[in-house]
Amino acid sequence: MNRTTLLLMFALVCAAGAAVMLRRAPEKRSPTGGDPLATVNWAGVRSLHCRRADGQEWTMLLKGGEWWLESPTVAEGRAVAANDQLRLNIFGVLHDVIPLESRPVAEISKGEWGLEPPELAVTIRDADGEVAIHFGRPDLNQELYYCTPDGKAVYKTDKLSVEELARDVVWLREPRLIDTNLEAAFFVEITPRDAPAYSLERSGLLWLIVHPDGSRRRADHTLTEQVVNGLCRMEGEPVTREDLGVELPEDPYCRITVRDGAGKQNIYDILYVDDNEQFLIAKRP
């Protein structure tokens, strides 16, 4: 068994079983009566911006038929694919909120309830314009008020209604390391730390192994499809270096590059492999 075959099998094992750790401004709506969440056309939402009291800020926006995440603390501020499952959860929960009570804003202290300044400031843009909603701090019963900045009434809901909004922003990013599916994948390059890089290229219905010297040979179709499918479907949970409990090397163990037929490229570095626990730690550059 040659070195290329061993590396290919290593990639298969990692991929199959590992887990890693001039535009018109929109009209602003300022409802002074009625639940502001009920004014949102949820089927037509185009963006949701959230600013939290702890300083975290992010926007989910619809561009080109896909949802993207923008945040100063994620991917150096670059727009990245959003976690669509969490987005649907956020939209679904807010859509289904039924206020536990409503009362005139003059009857409460906005400062005491965390509405001024707000614990969460959310701006939702739909096909009809924008609505800004402030969410306050939960009380001992895990209930909180929300309102529009200039609204005449406040509405109470439970903390679960905004739980996803309070997540660390890194969770809102698409969990897959590669957002290209098997059918679209055209090119895969595997660059080990201590060995020459080699690649897999699709040619019609076939896959070819391209060796470091440029020579090509036909790859095992079933094995290659398994490798590429595993690499494209790999998901992980975000962690910080403090959470890991292991020392990470300066140079990656291996770099994986996947490109589709349209030229869209995804890259991630495998930083650490634990053979005993069957997990690896990877990072997107």
Image: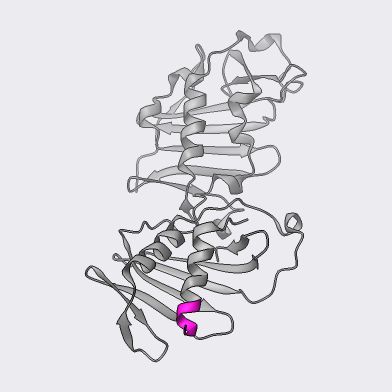
In this image, 59 relative to 44: left or right? right
Residue 48 visible in this rendered orientation of the protein: no
Residue 285 lies, with reference to residue 133, above or below; the image says: below
Q: Position of residue 110 (x, y in %)?
A: 71, 20
Q: Quadrant of the C terminus?
A: bottom right
Whether residue 3 is visible: yes
**98 or 22, which is in the foreground?**
98
Which residues, given as a range, are shown in magenta?
Answer: 1-6
Furthest residue to the bottom? 213
Determine if the magenta segment contains residue 191: no
Left or right relative to 242: residue 132: left
Q: Quadrant of residue 249?
A: bottom right
Please report the residue visible at 59 percent of the width from the left and 53 percent of the height from the top.
Answer: 72
The percent position of residue 223, horizontal first and vertical second, equals: 38, 67
In the rendered image, the vertical position of residue 71 relative to residue 228, given as above or below: above
Extreme residue toward the front, this view? 1
> Residue 59 or 152: which is nearer the viewer?
59
The residue that appears at 55% across and 56% down in the rendered structure is 77
Per the picture, the main secondary structure of the magenta-coloured stretch is helix
Q: How is the image coloured?
A: one colour
Report x, y in % for residue 246: 75, 64
Q: Is residue 11 shown left or right of residue 253?
A: left
Q: Is residue 116 above or below residue 34?
A: below
Residue at position x 52%, y 53% from top? 235
60 vs 22, nearest the viewer: 60
